[in-house]
Image (cartoon, rainbow, N blue to C red):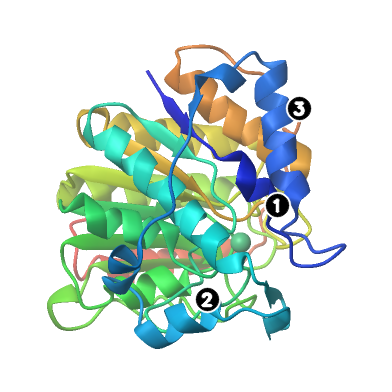
Amino acid sequence: MVVVVFHNDLIAHNHWEGHPESPMRLQALQRKLEKEGLLDIHVTAKEVGEEALLRIHSRRMIDKVKGGKGIPLDPDTMLREETFSLACLSAGVAMEAVRRTMEGEPAIALTRPPGHHAGPDYSSGFCYFNNIALAADAAGVRVAIVDIDAHHGNGTQDIFYERDDVLYISLHEEGIFPGTGRVEETGSGKGEGYNVNIPLPHGAGNRSFTEAMDRIIEPIVKQYRPELLLVSLGVDAHYADRYSTLRVNSSVYLEMCRRLIAIAPEGRITFVLEGGYHLRATAEVVHGIIAHLRGEESRSEYVDESEEPPQAARYLQRAYELHSQHWDL
Ligand SMILES: [Zn+2]
């Protein structure tokens, strides 16, 4: 039906008081699942080992995270003594979810710290190791990753930029952290065409997300014919979230996820949590996905509609034209 992978220890991960990527994020998810009577369906996971990390990340970077002594790694990301083992555990949660999916069950990995800003040789933006990239690589099959976090997944892009066995598609807001994700960044060498960025302007919302799905994401995933579909599930493009100006509501988030579930090969889909800092909105979307995979209804509280900025259509048209050079759109 659906496997929810979660580990209580991940609640302990903490940057500093008032940091948006806070323990309360997982606690809110836990409370929501408890309230819906779903907490008992979760399974747990183990830390990934260093050999697995080394398949994606450099020795220098692993040692840097390991040596954490209470000094920030960048202005947003703290390194503490326990960071290394918790980052390995978060990656382990993603790996376990993908392992269960490959055995035939869709899964959702409640990962934190998140991962998509961690590249081959760097940790940044609340991320230490790239959970979804480690899980994608370990699956050993043809994978499509669809990243719907408001921020561009620069780490995931960099890791797979020259590979054609992992397709990376990112829908994100232009001009915010990390500043990458231009539409012209399409991959290189063997990976040319397999990196698909769809940047959106400030204030874009429901219509842009839906149109990007209709015109670009769905046709490309179908043509790529992955053996496994992974979703970098960031909920910070939500209008309730302060960490982007995107204005997607819960219904559109859930509709995107339902459509991704519908095109996943033989139901092989894993959602891996990235950002999402509004506790109730994130919990509502995560619960909605689980409920849908269980064949149950869910009700959304955050369903406001907003005006699309006038330049949004031009952004989508540009992405559509550019990606049409590689795909039949
Ligand atoms: Zn984000």
Mark 1 → mark 2, Cα distance in angstroms = 17 Å
Residue 231 visible to the viewer: no
Q: Residue at x 43, y 30 (%)?
A: 258
Mark in front: 3 vs 2: 2
Residue 248 in the image: state x and y as whole percent.
Answer: 64, 46
Left or right side of 245 for 146: left
- Quadrant of image for the C terminus: bottom left
Residue closer to the observer: 268 or 83: 83
Return the residue at label 1.
12
Return the residue at label 3.
301
Amino acid marked by disc 2 = Lys
Residue that lies at the very extreme toward the bottom in this rendered image? 60
Left or right side of 97 for 162: left
Q: Are marks 1 and 2 in contact (CB under 8 Å)?
A: no
Residue closer to the observer: 152 or 112: 112
Secondary structure at badge 2 equals helix
Q: Are marks 3 and 2 in contact (CB under 8 Å)?
A: no
